[in-house]
């Protein structure tokens, strides 16, 4: 009975997610669903990405959080459009929440929307929210065992960013083991070792992202 | 309609949690529900606690994970009884899962059970699993904004452990801001600044835990 309810919810969610993706594809907008644990560095990566790419791309951000607008305030300082979704304690964004805020963005003049999901390695993986790709951030301070412990969110990611590599000398993170596990779970993913402190790896991420935006314009829907 | 279903599930869960707590209280066993993000250091803290206290307390561990038994294997090496619950992708433990594994432990010869929940700052806060107290671990690498962003799990914690303080010199974590926010959310919590690398703060945690176990024996149910 419970399983049936869950299946219906997921079907309904996917239908709305498809409508969002169709609507944004018609405008040539590439959409990223940015995922990861609390504190893995999603917002810092997004701030760097805005600074690094806003001269070349017209970006907007949708921020998902349980209660506060702390992350949206950080993004707003960089001068890009941002809308906040508060889930009121809910553990993930769903397509309906995203759909309800899209009219708050000027969709005729955007190349890229990044949706920062709620900090959570489990639940957000189950809900499509209209994205073209999922990008999962794992900070090295979380430990190299996380891909095997939370495989779904790594399996679905087009890019996995191993973040905070500036802290490698102060931890016992086993990079080779992390890479092996990630490659086994998701052989097709793009793996970027990055630091928002030293800016290591960021140009690789920017290059990938710009190429996706370019291809989306060409490919259309 | 959905809210009603959720309320029923929570009511049913609380009823089973109460039965677990009653059963374990009759045996004089103190029960900790250990919470925190993926990679905040819950298992490392547990390993230290076992080494630090196993001469004085008879402990057992229940490990909650989505799929693997990685954490249970780490605990087993320290020679304490451990049972693994795999949620098969589920984002939290519930009372029914805990109830189903209790017969795997020798309840006549235990002082303390620590239940390590799934790494997640959101969903596990909603489900009692028979514990006497919740203990929430926040690693300083996650950032000082997390208590306000995920207030429920900090509000319900009898102890909050600010972990990985050995990494403070390499991050911009604002300890004063974290303490102020936590104190506003939960003025009664015991706040411990700890590191499993340097062992800072651990004796404070052990002392608190031993006192709770002692009081539970005296108090009974």
Image: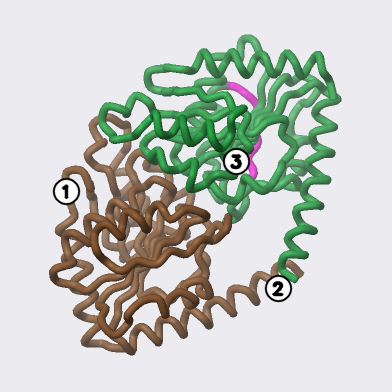
Chain colours: A green, B brown
Q: Is residue B208 left or right of residue A209?
A: left
Which quadrant is home to the C terminus of chain A? Answer: top right
Viewer-side residue, B203 vs A186: A186
In the drawing, what numbered circle is on residue B4? 2
Q: Where is B110 relative to A20, above or below? A: below
- Number of callouts: 3
Is A65 a magenta residue? no
Q: What residue sits right under mark 3 in the picture?
A: A117
Q: Mark 2 touching mark 1, by CB under 8 A? A: no
| Residue B70 image point, x, y percent | 40, 52
Q: Are marks 2 and 3 on the same chain?
A: no
Span of residues in magenta: A79-85
> At 19% from the left edge and 72% from the top edge, which residue is drawn?
B57
| Residue A114 image point, x, y percent | 64, 29
Q: Chain of mark 2?
A: B
> CA separation, marks 2 and 1?
46 Å
Residue A86 seen in the figure: no
Q: Residues within 10 Å of mark 2 (few under 14, many from 20)?
A: few
In the drawing, what numbered circle is on residue B200? 1
Which quadrant is home to the N terminus of chain A? Answer: bottom right
Mark 1 lies on a secondary structure that is: loop
> CA separation, marks 1 and 3?
34 Å
Q: Where is A22 relative to B145, above or below? A: above
Viewer-side residue, A218 vs A110: A218
Q: Quadrant of residue A186?
A: top right
> At 72% from the left edge and 13% from the top edge, which residue is drawn?
A214
Residue B44 seen in the figure: yes
Mark 2 lies on a secondary structure that is: helix
> At 29% from the left edge and 48% from the top edge, which residue is drawn?
B163
Q: Are marks 2 and 1 on the same chain?
A: yes
| Residue B190 image point, x, y percent | 27, 62
Is A80 a magenta residue? yes
């Amino acid at each position: 009975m419970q399983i049936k309810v869950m299946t219906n919810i997921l079907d309904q969610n996917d239908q709305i997610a498809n409508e969002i993706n169709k609507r944004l594809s018609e405008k040539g907008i590439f959409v990223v669903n940015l995922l990861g644990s609390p504190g893995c560095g999603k917002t810092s990566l997004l701030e760097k990405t805005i600074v690094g790419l806003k001269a070349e791309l017209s970006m907007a951000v949708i921020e998902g959080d349980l209660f506060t607008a702390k992350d949206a305030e950080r993004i707003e300082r960089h001068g890009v459009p941002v809308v906040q979704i508060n889930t009121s304690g809910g553990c993930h964004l769903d397509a309906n929440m995203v759909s309800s805020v899209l009219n708050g963005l000027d969709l005729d003049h955007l190349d890229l929307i990044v949706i920062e999901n709620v900090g959570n390695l489990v639940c957000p993986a189950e809900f499509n929210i209209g994205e073209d790709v999922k990008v999962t951030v794992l900070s090295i301070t979380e430990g190299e065992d996380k891909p095997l412990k939370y495989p779904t969110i790594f399996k679905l990611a087009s890019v996995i960013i191993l973040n905070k590599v500036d802290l490698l000398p102060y931890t016992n993170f086993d990079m080779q083991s992390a890479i092996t596990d990630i490659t086994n779970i998701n052989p097709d993913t793009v793996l970027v070792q990055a630091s928002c402190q030293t800016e290591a790896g960021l140009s690789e991420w920017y290059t990938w992202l710009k190429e996706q935006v370019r291809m989306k314009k060409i490919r259309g829907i």
